[in-house]
Image (cartoon, helix red, strand yellow):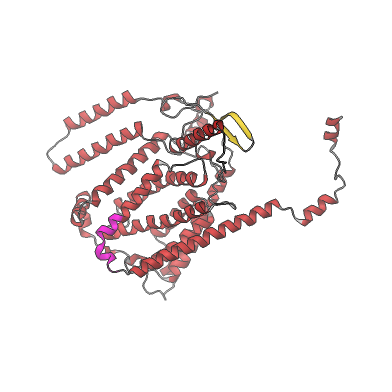
């Protein structure tokens, strides 16, 4: 049997005593990762005896550990999962010493850049050593530890900027990119003009890089959320959000056919369809991972190395259940609203601090936010659907802090912008968001109840055919032979 490791070189036990109903298993191998979470919350009686209580406490603790720092199963190349802390320390110190002594220190800006990069470098090294893996292990847990370190760095940067005035923040961005001095937000492309002109050239002009961004973005969201009802709720509500804040953000002003047909139906709809199609393919795939050492051909070894960048397993997501509790219902609505806030932060940050949409800061933030969201959504899902998990995952906690910090930064530095809005608009927006979220989530629950009832109730035609079957009540020849 292959070793099981927690990816820091320390073997971990894989057996946890568990109990359910009247049946109990004294020692069973605990599934690794979030795939062990049940689709429906497990009801547990509060009157368990001492032994069961101890097992439940151990199971609850183990569930959080797995979703927060998932161990790695079936290690084939031990070298990449053994601790190399002394080697890493020596290489890091030697690299920094060499760079510090041989570089030219005449330019102040270069010195500041070198110092900042050195801080980031060592912080990410500490992240690899000390931070949790999160719920994913592919391509390597160290990758997700580094991303978690990046999210912590971004959160600390937001906290620093929160205590600076607007001009200081703008000067920081000018120092990062002096070209921003020549850009103003009113230079952006306008979409909501001459809406009566619906010629092919006009429509083709709107199918620009941002349309592809819509499509790919929604495909990525579909892979993360994996629920058509929630995705369509977010898509429709975002168009309402654009209408609500169009008087503050000019690029939210769109023609009706651009918002309804190009955005919602074509870009968002096709993106959702493609993302869910990918999820369905991955769910149907049979995951049998062979060790790279057991593959004899060079082509096979290369193919197995490339497959390391694909998911280790793919479990179906079930946000809503026909027997969902009110708290689970509210948690899904909260997810939908928080997603709207995250999207709003993107546009307000770009507008308030005046950056073009294709600027490297804007693009870099979008990429990192997407990477931070992936483990955060998984941890939030387990926290919402698995009653054994009593704490939200660390990455999800950090991302929640990032979302709130970005919103505070926008409100603090966009006072003049937000003074142009009316409180009634915000109240109506929040009310509509809640109502639509509740409606979509409620319809999704009813749909799942109907599908469950349909699957559990045989049709009349099937019942009649079974009743009229000539073999009804008779055993098959094989079974008769077995009985004899």
| Residue 367 visible in the shown view | no
Note whether 220 is above or below 204 in the view shown.
above
Q: Nearer the viewer, residue 207 or 65?
A: 65
Which quarter of the rendering shows the N terminus?
top right
Q: What are the residue bounds of the magenta stretch?
A: 408-420
Residue 350 position, x and y percent, is 30, 57
Q: Is residue 362 magenta?
A: no
Which quarter of the rendering shows the C terminus?
top right
Residue in view at x 74 percent, y 53 percent: 458
Quick check: 339 left or right of 269? left
Residue at the farthest left position: 106
Residue in view at x 22 percent, y 40 percent: 116
Q: Give residue 446's quadrant in the image.
A: bottom right
Q: Main secondary structure of the magenta part?
A: helix
Residue 150 position, x and y percent, is 33, 42
| Residue 143 visible in the shown view | yes
Residue in view at x 54 percent, y 38 percent: 36
Quick check: 290 left or right of 101? right
Residue in view at x 33 percent, y 49 percent: 364
Q: Nearer the viewer, residue 447 or 85?
A: 447
Quick check: 412 left or right of 68? left
Note whether 332 is above or below 117 in the view shown.
below
Number of numbered discs overlaid on the protein picture: 0
């Amino acid at each position: 049997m292959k070793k099981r490791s927690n990816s820091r070189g320390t073997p971990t036990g894989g057996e946890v005593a568990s109990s359910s109903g009247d049946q109990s298993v004294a020692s069973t191998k605990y599934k690794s990762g979030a795939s062990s979470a049940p689709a429906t919350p497990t009801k547990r009686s509060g009157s368990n005896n001492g032994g069961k209580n101890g097992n439940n406490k151990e199971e609850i603790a183990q569930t959080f550990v797995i979703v927060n720092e998932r161990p790695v199963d079936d290690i084939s190349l031990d070298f990449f999962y053994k601790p190399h802390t002394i080697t890493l320390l020596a290489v890091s110190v030697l690299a920094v010493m060499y760079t510090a002594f041989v570089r030219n220190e005449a330019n102040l800006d270069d010195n500041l850049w070198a110092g900042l990069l050195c801080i980031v470098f060592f912080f990410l090294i500490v992240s690899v050593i000390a931070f949790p893996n999160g719920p994913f292990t592919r391509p390597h847990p160290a990758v997700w530890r580094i991303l978690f370190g990046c999210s912590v760095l971004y959160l600390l940067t937001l906290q620093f900027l929160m205590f600076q005035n607007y001009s200081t923040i703008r000067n920081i961005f000018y120092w990062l990119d002096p070209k921003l001095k020549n850009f103003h937000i009113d230079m952006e492309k306008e979409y909501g003009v001459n809406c009566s002109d619906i010629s092919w050239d006009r429509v083709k002009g709107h199918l620009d890089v941002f349309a592809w961004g819509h499509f790919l973005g929604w495909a990525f969201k579909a892979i993360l959320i994996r629920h058509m009802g929630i995705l369509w709720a977010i898509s429709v509500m975002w168009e309402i959000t654009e209408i609500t804040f169009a008087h503050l953000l000019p690029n939210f002003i769109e023609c009706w056919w651009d918002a309804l047909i190009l955005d919602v139906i074509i870009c968002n709809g096709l993106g959702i369809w493609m993302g869910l199609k990918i999820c369905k393919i991955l769910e149907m795939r049979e995951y049998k991972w062979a060790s790279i050492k057991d593959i004899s051909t060079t082509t096979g070894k290369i193919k197995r190395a490339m497959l390391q960048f694909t998911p280790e397993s793919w479990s179906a997501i079930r946000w809503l259940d026909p027997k969902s509790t009110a708290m689970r219902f509210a948690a899904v609505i909260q997810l939908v609203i928080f997603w709207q806030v995250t999207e709003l932060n993107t546009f307000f940050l770009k507008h308030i601090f005046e950056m073009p949409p294709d600027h490297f800061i804007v693009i870099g933030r979008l990429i990192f936010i997407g990477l931070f969201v992936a483990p955060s959504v998984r941890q939030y899902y387990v926290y919402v659907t698995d009653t054994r998990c009593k704490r939200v995952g660390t990455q999800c906690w950090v991302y929640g802090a990032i979302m709130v910090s970005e919103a505070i930064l926008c409100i603090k530095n966009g006072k003049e912008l937000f003074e142009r809005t009316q409180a009634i608009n915000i109240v109506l927006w929040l009310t509509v968001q809640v109502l639509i979220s509740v409606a979509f989530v409620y319809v999704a629950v009813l749909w799942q109840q109907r599908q469950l009832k349909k699957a559990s109730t045989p049709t009349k035609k099937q019942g009649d055919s079974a009743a009229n079957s000539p073999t009804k009540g008779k055993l098959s020849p094989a079974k008769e032979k077995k009985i004899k």
